[in-house]
Image (cartoon, rainbow, N blue to C red):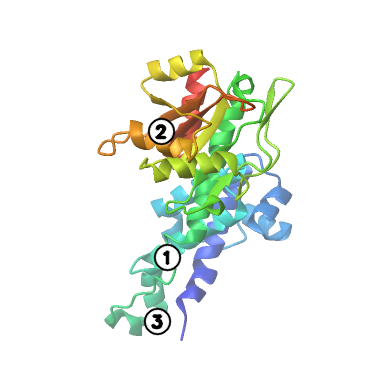
C-alpha cells in the first residue's frame, strides 16, 4: 500500500526543490540563502547543486511545474512572495496534480489496483483563504515597490502619511484589509515603508475603501495622496472619475458621495475621491481601484 503523499515526498518534492534551488541560485542567492528560503539544510542544497538528487523527468518537463518554479523564484527574490505564500502556491499545484493528473498516474504506477477506480485525491482547496490572503499581501508588496521606486512619489504623501491597502474579495471589516503598519512617510524626500504589509493595521484608508465598496463600487484597493487641484485635474484628464465629498457630512461622507455620483449600472474600475479640507481636517485624495498594483500604477503615471 502506497499513499499519494508518499509519491509527492519521494518523487515530486526532490525534483521541485532542486529546480527551485537552481532558479534561486540563478537569481543571485547564496547557498545559505537558498537553504533558508526552502527550509532545508545547506548540505541538501549542495546535493541539489551537484546533481546528487534523482529527479523525475515527468516533473522537469511539465510546463506548469516550470512556470511555478519561475514564479516562486521571482517572488522570493523580489520579496513580493513570502515563504508561506510560496508554500501555498506549491501546495495548490500538488493538489491539482493529484486530481486525475500527473501525480495520480505515478500513484497508479505504484498502486496498479487504483487504475480501475475513478478516484479523486483533490483534498486541498485552491481557493482557500490562506492562499487568498497571501495573494493580497503579495499584491500590496508589488504596489509598494511601484510607489517607492517612482520618482516624485514622496512629494504626493500628505502630512498624515500615505497607505496602500487591498482587501479580501468578501471583506466585511478592517480586519479583512491589508496595508502598511504605521503608514508611508516622506523622510528627506524618500518614501519610507516601516514594515511588511499586514491585515487590520489601517483604519483610515481601509475605512474609505470599505465605504466605497458599500456605495456599490467593485474596488479592492486604495491609496491616499495629498490634495492638490492640479492633481485632481491631471487625474480627471487621464480619464478617471473624480468625486468630491464633504468631510463634515454627518454620516459616512465617502459612501454618500459615491452612492450619489457613481452610476450603479456601469461603475468605473478606478475612481478618485477627494475633499479640499475643513476645520482641523487636512485636504486629501484617494485613488481606488481593482488591486494595489493597479492603484499604484495610476499614481506612478502621474509623475
Instruction: Pick whichever, 224 or 280, lies toward us.
Output: 280
Residue 156 left/right relative to 250: right
Q: Residue, x 65% and y 39% (percent of image)?
A: 28
Q: Residue, x 51% and y 75% (percent of image)?
A: 6
Identify the residue position indicated by label 1 in the image. Answer: 125
- Outermost residue toward the top in this view: 230
* Residue 272 in view here: yes
CB of mark 1 within 8 Å of CB of mark 3? no
CB of mark 2 within 8 Å of CB of mark 1? no
Residue 20 is tagged as none
Residue 177 left/right relative to 233: right
- The image quadrant that residue 62 belongs to is bottom left
Tell me which label, 1 or 3, sits earlier in the chain: 3
Identify the residue position indicated by label 2 in the image. Answer: 257
Q: CA distance from mark 1 to mark 3?
A: 25 Å
Q: Residues within 10 Å of mark 1 (few under 14, many from 20)?
A: few
Amino acid at each position: 500500500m502506497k499513499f499519494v503523499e508518499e509519491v509527492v515526498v519521494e518523487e515530486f518534492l526532490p525534483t521541485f526543490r532542486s529546480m527551485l534551488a537552481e532558479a534561486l541560485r540563478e537569481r543571485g542567492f547564496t547557498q545559505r540563502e537558498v537553504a533558508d528560503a526552502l527550509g532545508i539544510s545547506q548540505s541538501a542544497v549542495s546535493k541539489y547543486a551537484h546533481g546528487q538528487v534523482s529527479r523525475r523527468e515527468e516533473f522537469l518537463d511539465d510546463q506548469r511545474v516550470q512556470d511555478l518554479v519561475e514564479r516562486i523564484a521571482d517572488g522570493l527574490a523580489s520579496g513580493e512572495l513570502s515563504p508561506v505564500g510560496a508554500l501555498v502556491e506549491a501546495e495548490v499545484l500538488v493538489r491539482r496534480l493529484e486530481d486525475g493528473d500527473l501525480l495520480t498516474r505515478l500513484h497508479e504506477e505504484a498502486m496498479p489496483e487504483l487504475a480501475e477506480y475513478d478516484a479523486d485525491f483533490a483534498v486541498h482547496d485552491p481557493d482557500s483563504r490562506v492562499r487568498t490572503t497571501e495573494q493580497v499581501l503579495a499584491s500590496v508588496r508589488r504596489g509598494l515597490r511601484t510607489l517607492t521606486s517612482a520618482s516624485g512619489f514622496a512629494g504626493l504623501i500628505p502630512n498624515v502619511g500615505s497607505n496602500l491597502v487591498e482587501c479580501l474579495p468578501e471583506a466585511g471589516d478592517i480586519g479583512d484589509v491589508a496595508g502598511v503598519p504605521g503608514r508611508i512617510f516622506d523622510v528627506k524626500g524618500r518614501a519610507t515603508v516601516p514594515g511588511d504589509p499586514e491585515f487590520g493595521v489601517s483604519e483610515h484608508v481601509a475605512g474609505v475603501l470599505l465605504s466605497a465598496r458599500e456605495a456599490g463600487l467593485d474596488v479592492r484597493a486604495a491609496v491616499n495622496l495629498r490634495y492638490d487641484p492640479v492633481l485632481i485635474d491631471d487625474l480627471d484628464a487621464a480619464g478617471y472619475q473624480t468625486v468630491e465629498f464633504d468631510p463634515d457630512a454627518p454620516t459616512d461622507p465617502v459612501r454618500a458621495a459615491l452612492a450619489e455620483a457613481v452610476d450603479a449600472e456601469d461603475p468605473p474600475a478606478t475612481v478618485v475621491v477627494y475633499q479640499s479640507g475643513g476645520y482641523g481636517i487636512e485636504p486629501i485624495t484617494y485613488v481606488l481601484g481593482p488591486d494595489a498594483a493597479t492603484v499604484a500604477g495610476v499614481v506612478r503615471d502621474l509623475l
